[in-house]
Amino acid sequence: MADAPTLWRIEIKAAEDAVAAVEAALEPQCIAVSRFIDAATGRWRVEGIAGAEPDPEALAARLAEAFAARGPAPPATVEPLAPRDWVGDNLAGFPPLSVGRFHIRGSHVAGPPPAGAIVLRLDAGQAFGTGEHATTKGCLTALDRLGRARRFRRPLDLGCGSGILALAMAKAWRVPVVATDIDANAVRVAEANARLNGVARLVRVARGPGYRVPAIVAGAPYDLIVANILARPLAAMAGDLARHLSPSGVAVLSGLLARDANWVMAAHRSFGLSLGRMLVFDGWATLVLAGRAR
């Protein structure tokens, strides 16, 4: 049997009030993210397991965003792990998951999916974004509810990670979807997942920061923009979102704690967007915004 691929461990020590921000920063590059506390010192340690060597620039950028209001980001320790069948060891911990009409399952799952489900095939061990995190759950819940009332034709997934939200939109409406991420590994994984789900012709994945990616510019305006990233960059890009969203469009924003929802919403309200709905799961908020009136 061939050796299992080498995995990489990212470790960051942080204060308790910064742990959630560190987790959110690591998740797009990691298979799994865990938190631990040293009972003797009361200090927290956040550990992420990545399926490929982390992109140092993308990791640094995400940590800088997470700590923009807190001061300098803590250092990250990155090291390879000894070969081991980590994916096989963790398959049992990745059971099928249903969120509304979306049904997420790994290739190891046997048996038919629920009747009428939109099946998203994702294997643990590729990249973050298997539907288990509250932010992904919030976005999928919002997409399910929006899709029951409207058919979208020009969606954008900004900060796509594994591509799960782009896959959901492509499979729900069978329309082209633009998906982008700043992390090269996430782009590769999203492309692989698009092929696995039979929507490679519909999902266009590109790498780059924010709305300056040529693929985003070429596809604008969008009637649906989904961005599951972090609170501060969401607020900073509110104007860009408004410029790329059609007047009757809808935006779904997540990756923010519920306590940060008001100021993120205020940033978008200043550009003419309004709050249609807010979903909260496990302390994480998902905002559904309506586009500017004509």
Image (tube, grey):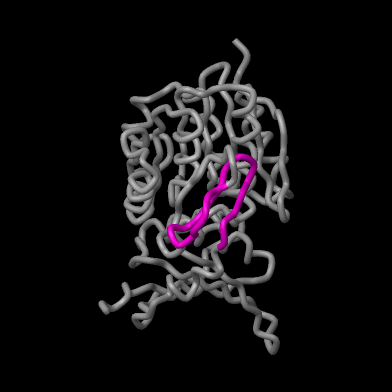
- In the rendered image, the quadrant that contains the N terminus is bottom left
Q: Is residue 211 left or right of residue 236?
A: left
Residue at coordinates 39% horizontally, 44% vertically from top-left? 197
Read off the magenta span. Answer: 95-113
Q: Residue 278 at what x, y percent from top left?
A: 72, 38
Q: Is residue 101 magenta?
A: yes
The residue located at (36%, 83%) in the rendering is 82
Residue 68 location (% of width, % of height): 55, 54
Residue 279 in the image: state x and y as whole percent.
71, 42
Left or right of 48, for residue 114: right
Residue 64 seen: no
Count of numbered tags: 0
Tell me, yes or no, whether the highlighted magenta stretch contains residue 198: no
Which of the pair 147/33 is nearer the observer? 147
Place residue 87 in its image quadrant: bottom left
Q: Is residue 27 above or below residue 264?
A: below
From what the image shows, is residue 204 above or below residue 274?
A: below
For the stretch drawn in magenta, the main secondary structure is: loop
Residue toward you, 143 or 106: 106
